[in-house]
Image: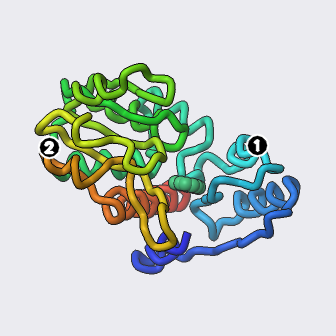
Amino acid sequence: MNNKKKACEYVGIKSFEYLLPAETSEDELLDLINRLNADDEVSGILCQLPLPAHLDEKIVINAIDPKKDVDAFHPVNVGRIMTGDYDFVPCTPAGVMELIKESGVDVSGKECVVVGRSNIVGKPMAMLLLHQNGTVTICHSKTKDLAEKTKNADIIVAAVGIPNFIKGDMIKPGAVVIDVGINRIAPKKLVGDVEFETAEKVAAAITPVPGGVGPMTIAMLMKNTVKAAIAQNR
Ligand code: GUN
């Protein structure tokens, strides 16, 4: 959240922060969202997840006006990603696509393996790769022989949340490896879902953690917010 606030300042977006206590009731949170929905000063609303256990994520996300849903988590925006008719792209998958594009990698016809099936990353990621004509496989904790799948991939997107899960010997030489994982293994040590030291020896291109996908996610959040502001203010 601090990096998101800093990015807003950097690009000239005014941000308002509401740091609510963990005991906040659903009604209180929904009241705040409704106030922000109605506030013309506010173009984008982001409710940082996860929420405390007594709050229902679905109810909270559904309360955000889809026009202000800069995370693209509302079912209306999720549905539009399925059909390919979307204004907001979820920030992390959008950042991954931008990295792929800027690196000159053409997704069309490529074997793409997404490891992880979360609503925030895995599922929308698969859709975006599919829209670019990738042949997409989604793998998850119940996938049998994961290495067989990843070794066949031209593009791997790792988003499982397990430190150093994908090792170099699971990667085809010359593959493009995007690491979405952010795992804290010590107070000051972040690692990804990919074991960088072994993977970088076989991959043609690979993103580091930290400093790879994370900053792109925030850049895409800024992009969605500017889009939302333009759409709401003509
Ligand atoms: N928690 C982890 N990633 C995200 C994100 O991109 N948006 C929100 N709102 N919460 C998150």
- The image position of residue 66, as x and y in percent, is 61, 46
Figure quarter occupied by ligand 1: bottom right
Pointer 1 or 2: first along the chain: 1
Q: Mark 1 and 2 residues: CB-CB less than 8 Å, in contact?
A: no
- Residue at label 1? 59
Residue found at x 47% / y 57%: 183
The image shows residue 54 at horizontal and vertical percentages of: 83, 50
Q: Nearer the viewer, residue 204 or 85?
A: 204
Q: Residue furthest top?
A: 144
Judge whether 157 appears above or below 132 on screen. below
Q: Residue at x 52, y 43 (%)?
A: 120
| Residue designated by label 2 | 202
Point 14% across, 49% down: residue: 201
Q: Quadrant of residue 209?
A: bottom left
Q: Crowdedness of circle 1 by 10 Å Cα count: few (<14), some, many (20+)?
A: few
**x%, y% of residue 180?**
39, 50
User: With 42 as the anchor, is 162 left or right in this view?
Assistant: left
